[in-house]
């Protein structure tokens, strides 16, 4: 072999390594191979939940077949093995979001529970009558209702940052809302209804310059872009395992150690205590103080494996691929007459909400389902967003790391069918 051909071979190898081989990736997801209503499944509902790679399915099966045991309790071998697996999943999460310490990672049920934990623990201790909490107009109900409940209980006030016609947060209005009464800011990293990516670093800086802590709801960010809580400097960050190609029923609350230390427990029970008498109970240390009862052990292990899987492809590459696919989809869908895209922010993640003039979103969804296409129709747990844009509902195509241009083409063809049926 000549030096040149060897060099060429190396180059090809390197390039092929750089190529995002989506067909190869799809093979890791057994569910994607099936037909729905006689058509190949086109799964475009990733913002609701993502599909699971074989590695995640396998690790859960193996856990129950060979390791199942309660953690932090027995000295027996199985329990020690289960504890090790659970705690190493915690370390995997810590590295994934670049937290400083393992104990800053709390296993919860999902983003919803993470936000409720902060509202009930931090909120109940530190929010007083007349204090203000800032959220935004584009929040998921999970980042609205827990604060409403807290405000009701404490006689505090919820302030809402408006968004512009493109679905971007209005930073100048946010600035105006920040005051000495503000005690907490809680804002989405990425909107699940619009796809807008918020400038979280700026949002955090603006709050911190006034000494106000910030929670970032990362449910739609963690699966699509690298997240670095140290660089972002947020005080709390939440995300859900099931949107990150992991199991349901497991999610993460990240909190800065000193804040978690200052917070009272959210739920009482086993594992969150050091000692219990009827006179006085001593709480366990962080993070166990916040993990009362037997946790979702298999779920945590499954999440650790999902993170490992995502890392094996690389979030930078996933992000670049999805961005490219989003612009392809946006262009293709914009060409359809009568389509209005809801959410046209400059910085967007792979979410495409739209309405088709004269056709209810629900009917769009029904016709698409006949074509094997799964996407979400409705208010996407973000009713204020729908009100803001004056629509009752939208159809939402949301991308995952395994979606393809061919699937977008299928979506476009199906949308023309919808038009045929309803006009
Ligand atoms: C899905 C979602 C949530 C809630 O996540 P759960 O997994 O249902 O707890 C919160 N915020 C955003 C932005 C979401 O997309």
Image (cartoon, rainbow, N blue to C red):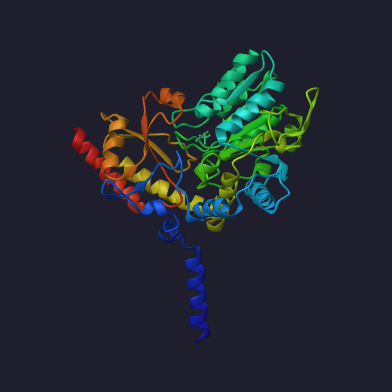
Q: Position of residue 199 (x, y in %)?
A: 58, 37
Which of the two residues, 80 or 91, is positioned nearer the viewer here? Answer: 80
Which of the two residues, 365 or 200, is positioned nearer the viewer here? Answer: 365
> Which residue lies most toward the bottom here?
1
Picture residue at 55% right of the left edge, 36% below the top: 198
Q: Which quadrant holds residue 397? A: top left
Q: Is residue 404 at all visible to an observer of this figure? A: no
219 left or right of 293? Answer: left
316 left or right of 423? Answer: right
Q: Position of residue 258 (x, y in %)?
A: 76, 35
Picture residue at 52% right of the left edge, 78% below the top: 7
Q: How many marks?
A: 0
Which of the two residues, 158 or 198, is positioned nearer the viewer here? Answer: 158
Q: Position of residue 28 (x, y in %)?
A: 45, 57
Which of the two residues, 208 or 365, is positioned nearer the viewer here? Answer: 365
Q: Position of residue 423 (x, y in %)?
A: 18, 33
Q: Is residue 132 at all visible to an observer of this figure? A: yes
């Amino acid at each position: 072999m000549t030096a040149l051909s060897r060099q060429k071979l190396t180059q090809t190898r390197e390039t092929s390594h750089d190529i995002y081989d989506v067909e190869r990736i799809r093979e890791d997801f057994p569910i994607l191979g099936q037909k729905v209503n006689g058509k190949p499944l086109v799964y475009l509902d990733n913002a609701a939940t993502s599909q699971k790679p074989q590695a995640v399915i396998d690790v859960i099966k193996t856990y129950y077949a060979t390791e199942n045991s309660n953690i932090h309790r027995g000295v027996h071998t199985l329990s020690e093995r289960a504890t090790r697996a659970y705690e190493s999943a915690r370390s995997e999460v810590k590295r994934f979001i670049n937290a400083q310490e393992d104990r800053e990672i709390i296993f919860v049920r999902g983003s919803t529970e993470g936000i409720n934990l902060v509202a009930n623990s931090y909120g109940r201790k530190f929010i007083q009558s007349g204090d203000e909490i800032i959220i935004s107009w584009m929040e998921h109900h999970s980042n609205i209702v827990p604060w409403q409940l807290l405000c009701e209980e404490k006689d505090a006030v919820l302030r809402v940052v408006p968004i512009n016609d493109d679905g971007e947060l209005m930073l100048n209005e946010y600035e105006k809302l920040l005051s000495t009464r503000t005690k907490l800011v809680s804002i989405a990293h990425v909107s699940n209804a619009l796809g807008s990516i918020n400038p979280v670093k700026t949002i955090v800086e603006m709050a911190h310059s006034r000494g106000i802590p910030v929670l970032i709801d990362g449910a739609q960010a963690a699966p699509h872009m690298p997240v670095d809580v140290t660089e972002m400097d947020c005080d709390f960050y939440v995300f859900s395992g099931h949107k990150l190609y992991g199991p349901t029923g497991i999610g993460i609350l990240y909190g800065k150690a000193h804040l978690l230390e200052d917070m009272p427990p959210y739920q009482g029970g086993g594992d969150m205590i050091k000692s219990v008498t009827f006179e006085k109970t001593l709480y366990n240390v962080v993070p166990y103080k916040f993990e009362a009862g037997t946790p979702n052990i298999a779920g945590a292990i499954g999440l650790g494996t999902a993170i490992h899987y995502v890392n094996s492809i690389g979030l930078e590459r996933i992000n670049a691929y999805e961005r490219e696919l989003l612009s392809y989809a946006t262009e293709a869908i914009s060409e359809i007459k009568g389509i209005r895209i809801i959410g046209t922010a400059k910085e967007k993640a792979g979410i495409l909400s739209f309405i088709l003039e004269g056709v209810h979103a629900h009917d769009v969804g029904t016709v698409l389902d006949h074509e094997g296409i799964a996407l979400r129709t409705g208010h996407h747990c973000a009713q204020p967003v729908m009100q803001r844009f004056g629509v009752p509902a939208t159809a939402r195509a949301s991308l995952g790391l395994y979606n393809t241009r061919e699937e977008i083409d299928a979506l476009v063809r199906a949308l023309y069918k919808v038009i045929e049926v309803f006009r």
